Amino acid sequence: MAKRKADDAADRDTMAKCTAGDGDKDTNKPLRLTRKNLALLNSLNGDNSDNDNDSDNSGYPESDSDMVNRKGTLSTTTSGFEARAYENGILDPTASKPAQDLDIIRHRLSRRRSSTQPSEHTHQQYCRDISDSFNEATASQDIQSDVMKKYNDLNYGKMNQRAITGIPEQVFKKGLSNPHPDRLDGFKTKALPSHMHSHALHTGKNSLSLCHFAAEFKRIDGNLNQAAYQAAYDGATLVYARDQALAEAKVDAASVQGLGAVVNKVAKETAVVTCATDGKVAEVFAHHFQNGEYHQNLVARESLLDYPNKGRELIRNAQDFARAKSYELLALLDADLKEEEEEKEEEQA
């Protein structure tokens, strides 16, 4: 206890010198890596990023375990992550084999939407906002509020910046931290029957299940290539979770004549899609598992700055496609949820 107090006093002295502008005078001793010191350093650097978070608390970590990487693992933003992902069988588009139904998905996600585009004035305001976004959090807020689709389905929701902790560590066992998508769409686990809560992707009471869509955001001058690699990991994780749910559906279908063939057909279809965007360009990927590897195929790449906004349509088509796949999987698991507020949702498409 005495040593801890002495260390705390030494840290306060070092921090005081930094604050007073005497950082070059006898401050070579490093600060200990504690939460208190990190908070002080952030405040000195003017980093109030915690205040930029979405007001929806359900989208953020509920416990420390959601934020801490497993010992000896690489996060998706660490140098060397791409090579480590490859060792785990997570391939980028250049190394991936195309899904057998990739052309079908490309056709479906490139369709023009029947809903009206925002006015050109509103679109120009978005272009100004995204160009002025000074960090990833601001870009994320602009993209989600002005580009992405909002659903009024009370059973279906989103989470932002929440680590996926519901996947066994041994699935991606060669030193990867938990995937941490910037956005994830799926069923609210608490809306599902209790026997399906094993499909939850997160720990804690707020979780999503049976997810088929994830997104990674960067600011307009950020590393979109890094976002694509992060999306590859997100997509691989969702494909694994979907395959586990389909395996359960196959067992249940064994007692129902003809249902097994339906499950087998669905299992062959590509269903998971992800998006990587910096607010200027939208890239949408499809993901599938083949021969022991997770493949990532580019579906389309569209501008979010042109008008009419094809990038906006691409992202929203991907969201709708993923949501339909979630409901399809739910039906195969012999569960039924009422899609509430559907008529109202369609008006906002």
Image (cartoon, rainbow, N blue to C red):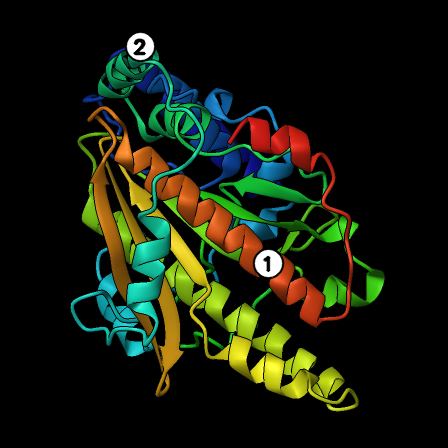
Task: Tell me, yes or no, whether the two marked residues, 1 and 2, touch with CB atoms within 8 Å.
Answer: no
Identified by mark 1, the residue type is: Ser
Which residue is label 1 attached to? 326
Tell me if residue 266 can be seen: yes
Image coords of residue 61 (percent x, y): 59, 42
Q: Secondary structure at mark 1?
A: helix
Q: Residue at x 77, y 48 (%)?
A: 338
Identified by mark 2, the residue type is: Ala
Image coords of residue 157 (percent x, y): 62, 41
Q: Is residue 305 left or right of residue 246?
A: left
Q: Is residue 120 left or right of residue 287?
A: left
Q: Secondary structure at mark 2?
A: loop
Q: CA distance from mark 1 to mark 2?
A: 56 Å
Q: Residues within 10 Å of mark 1 (few under 14, many from 20)?
A: many
Mark before the other along the chain sequence, 1 or 2: 2
Could you say which disc has been placed on residue 20 in the image? 2
Image coords of residue 86 (percent x, y): 26, 73
